[in-house]
Amino acid sequence: MATNVIMPALGIAQETGKLLQWLKTEGQMVTKGEVLMVVETDKTTVEIEAGASGILSQVSAQVGQDVPVGQVIALIAEPGESLPIKTQPHVQTAPAESPILSSESPRGKGSVEASPLARRIAEENHIDLSKVKPGGGRIEKADVVAYIEKLIKMPGARLSAASPKARQAAQERGVKLVDIPGSGPEGAVLFADVMASAKTMPAAAIETTAPGEIIKPGTVWRIMAERTTQSWTTVPHFYLSREANASRLITWRERAQKRMSEKITYTDLIVRLVAAALLEHPRVNAMWKDGAIHVNPDVNIGLAVAIADGLVVPVIHGTQNMNIAAIARQRNDLVARAQNGKLKPDDISGGTFTISNLGMFGIDSFNAIVNAPQAAILAVGRIVERVVPHDGRPAIQSMMTLTLSCDHRAVDGARGAQFLQTLAEMIEEPLGLLD
């Protein structure tokens, strides 16, 4: 029986998703767990895996199209399975990137009879199938290959074949594939080639003009800009700041590190303490949605992670049931995959509270923008030695500043202050929470 391929819901408030790329073409065999498509949500771009093995059939969503969440956009059929005839034929548009052959324009929109393999090769190389002469009744692989070879021999032509993942990475970074030397078979551009080039190229497209530079950001940065603008203009923010003595937090981290193989960071400790504090103040672990306050039963903490192209917020799920070692393992894995573009849909969905820590950059304090529809976000500053009163005398203590940004529709000042007070007390006396 055929399996539906649907536009997934990757966020609580998400209504649609944009299809950025099909990594398989209609008629091609797919394997369960294999990356099938790339989708852009209101948070970031993610790779969606196939939910079953079979033949990709009846593709109805076009690249660049915004599709409602839950809508069926294709089927994965078992080999030999008979499917109902589609009422609307699907024409897949090519990804919006530069032509692969400098002497050839992107493929046209004409309907041409071709084998699935021939069509796939043509799509990967932006070949206009209407210009390919078939040797028989329809265009086959050999016809497309012969046409490509003919183009390569033309003056000034350059073939830049690339893997689907490399194409997506180049598109997000505003990099032209023809400018990247490929290390794959016959000079094909691989994902590693794009990433290597990105180290010497700007993450976004830069246009130099008389007044100055114009930066055209990639997809991740654009999404970040849109989401923060929406949150800032629609969420009534207010801020609460408090200092906490981090001396015992430092001691607990040193002790925990001696007992554990995983690297323990202050972020790991803060995640554990925030989870405990949220259990005592569940209204802060809530969200404003459809004119009502929704209190979340689980504590799923998102971590703001800076990557080359912007900001993503992977989520550690069920932190209320995790110890420090488990949090550290999860945090390390999520951050590594975020920086390598390997996050999965579950990694960025379901967050109920967000932490943004800029202490490692020497920042004392800052105001973060609420990650809507969540009710609050915690901004964490660096730990720094300050002269403060201690037992009635001035003393040098390790202090840190915590700033809580709240959505006033879901959290009032008193509730926010009570949560921040509890968190500060836990930092100053962590007890056994850091084991």
Image (tube, helix red, strand yellow):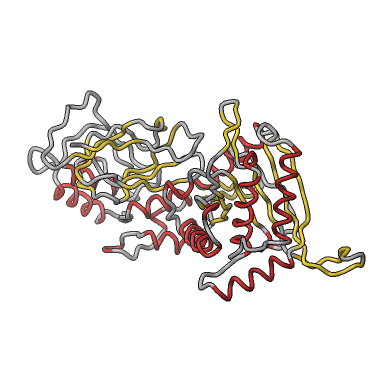
Q: Quadrant of residue 69?
A: top left
**Residue 393 rendering spot, x and y as whole percentages:** 92, 67
Q: Quadrant of the C terminus?
A: bottom right
**Total marks placed:** 0
Q: Residue furthest left?
A: 136
Q: Is residue 153 above or below residue 261?
A: above
Q: Is residue 69 above or below residue 182?
A: above
Residue at position x 40%, y 42% in the image: 39
Q: Quadrant of the N terminus?
A: top left
In the displayed structure image, the side of residue 217 where residue 387 appears, left or right: right
Q: Is residue 104 visible?
A: no
Given residues 18 and 240, the one toward you in this image is: 240
Q: Quadrant of residue 61?
A: top left
Q: Is residue 64 above or below residue 50?
A: above
In the displayed structure image, the side of residue 415 where residue 178 appears, left or right: left
Q: Residue furthest front?
A: 432
Residue at position x 42%, y 55% in the image: 342
**Residue 50 rendering spot, x and y as whole percentages:** 29, 46
**Residue 188 rendering spot, x and y as whole percentages:** 31, 60
In the displayed structure image, the side of residue 29 where residue 327 appears, left or right: right
Given residues 23 and 404, the one toward you in this image is: 404
Q: Quadrant of residue 186?
A: bottom left
**Residue 421 rendering spot, x and y as whole percentages:** 75, 50
Given residues 117 and 372, the one toward you in this image is: 372
Residue at position x 92%, y 64% in the image: 392
Q: Residue furthest top?
A: 87
Q: Is residue 357 above or below residue 139?
A: below
Q: Is residue 142 visible?
A: yes
Q: Residue furthest bottom?
A: 258
